[in-house]
Structures are given as C-alpha cells and as structure tokens.
Amino acid sequence: MRHLRRIVKIISLLLWSMLLMLPAAVSLGCCGRWRRIKRGSLWAKRWARGAAWLTGVRLKVHGNYGDVSGKLLVSNHLGYLDILAQGALFPIRFSPKAEIRYWPLLGQLVALNAPVWIDRTSPHKARQYSAEFRATLEHGVSLLVYPEGTSSDGKHGLLPFKSTPFAALPENGKIQPMLLFYREEPANEAPGAWFGDISFPAHVWGVLGLKRINIEVFIMPEMQPLPGETRKELACRVRDAMQKEYYRHEELV
C-alpha cells in the first residue's frame, strides 16, 4: 500500500509541477525585476498549496497573520517540509542553496521564484546576500529565515539563534515570528521532521509513504527592533519570545 501511495504522489507532483510551469513562465517573462519577484512569490504559494495537499501535508493555523508583505518571517526549523508548509501559507521569496538550481525539474520550479541562490562555499558573499535580503523586504516581498541554522526534532525547545538573518531587516522593519509543530497521526507513523543522520533521499521516500502529515502553525504577535538594539540583542529577544510561546504548546509535540 505504501509503495502504491508513493507512486501516486510522485506522478501527481510531477503533473502538478508541469501544469504550473508554463503559465508561470509566461506570467513572469513580461515584467520588471521586482514585479517578477513579487509574482514569483505568488506562483510559489500556488505551487506549494497544491504540492502540500498532494503529499498529504495538512495545515492547522492558530492566530492571524494578515498581510505579511515586506516582513521578515522567523520560524523554528524541523526540516524541508517547513518550506512547503510555510510556502503554502505565505507568498515568499526563497533563499535555497545554489546547487538546487541544477536539480531536474525542482531547479526549474524554484528558479521561477527568482530566489536568492546561496553559495555556502563562499562565505565572503554574506554581505551581498544581506543586501539582497534587505532590498527584498524594502520592495514589499516577505522573506523567510530559520535563525537556528539547522533543523532539529523540535522536542527540546529552540536552538540558539544566529544573528546574521536579522541584519537584513531595514529600519522600522517588521518581524513575524511563528512556530511549527509536527503531529504524528496515526501514532505509530514517523513524523515528517528531518534531522540527524538520515539521508535526504531515504527521508523523502519515507515521507512519501505516509498517508498524512499534520503540521500546526502558531502565528505570534508582530515584533519590531527597539531603538539602539543590536542585531544580536534583537535575535535573543525574538528567540526568548518564541521559546516562551514554544513551552506553552510543547504538549503538542
């Protein structure tokens, strides 16, 4: 049964992706750079909604987030399904690792989002990325960051936050914190979180075999930098607020 489920999901995802690629390419090919980036975030949301449904991801959102245009979206990180879940909720400009652009089909799909390709082998480009992130927010496009820097099982609170992502925040910029929790249903199935030593292909294969993955998203109140606050102080304050909220809902994990 699981093998059949995997085959159906793979075929459905391929058909859905190819169905959106042509109209997306036409829509994005006739406008300026920032309009293209904004449209790309909307097309990414359309694709993610369909892909989430086809893969069995079911979202339950707590709280109201309203208009997230130009906000820095800050979240805990449980694995690659976070991006699919949050992409289904928000129009986002992504910042994937550079090698993804060469992956068959997925690379072409991600490229339609006009992402900021991150080359992790070139640390000296960090300032360039930060400038592009800031410009993205200033042009009213939301940007998603995971300040923990890596994924975890989500069962032991949040990892320490790196302050670098907060350098992208423009003056008077707004932060939209949120928390994700993966729920196991039925109880004997593994959750969709990806961490530790398991390989990416093996985990994807396992996820495709699951009937359903329930993800709860808690939207927290908007935050802003305080006058004179450094990015490290801001990162700590945001983490403290998210950690406090996390422990309010830890019974969910």
Image (cartoon, rainbow, N blue to C red):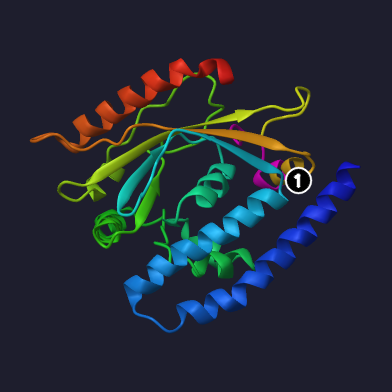
Point out residue 179 in the picture as x, y percentages from the top left corner.
46, 31
Say if 216 sits above or below 6 in the image.
above
Say if 140 sits above or below 213 in the image.
below
Pointer 1 local density, CA inside 10 Å: few below 14, some 14–19, many at least 20: many
Q: Residue at x 27, y 63 (%)?
A: 139
Q: Farthest left residue?
A: 228
Name the residue beneath numbered marker 1.
208
* Quadrant of the snapshot with the N terminus: top right
Point out residue 82 in the picture as x, y percentages from the top left corner.
54, 42
Residue 29 counted in the magenta span: no
In the image, what residue type sits under mark 1? Leu
Depth check, front residue: 65 or 25? 65
Q: Farthest bottom residue?
A: 30
**Which element is circle 1 on?**
helix
Q: Residue at x 26, y 60 (%)?
A: 128
Point out residue 106 in the picture as x, y percentages from the top left corner.
61, 63
Say if 234 sits above or below 88 in the image.
above
* Quadrant of the snapshot with the C terminus: top right
Residue 199 counted in the magenta span: yes
Question: Residue 126 lies in what quarter of the image?
Answer: bottom left
Report the number of discs.
1
**Which secondary structure dominates the residues rendered in magenta?**
loop
Q: Residue at x 33, y 53 (%)?
A: 123
Q: Residue at x 61, y 36 (%)?
A: 194
Point out residue 98 in the picture as x, y percentages from the top left corner.
47, 61
Q: Is residue 55 left or right of residue 22?
A: right
Question: For the magenta stretch, what is the residue range?
Answer: 194-203
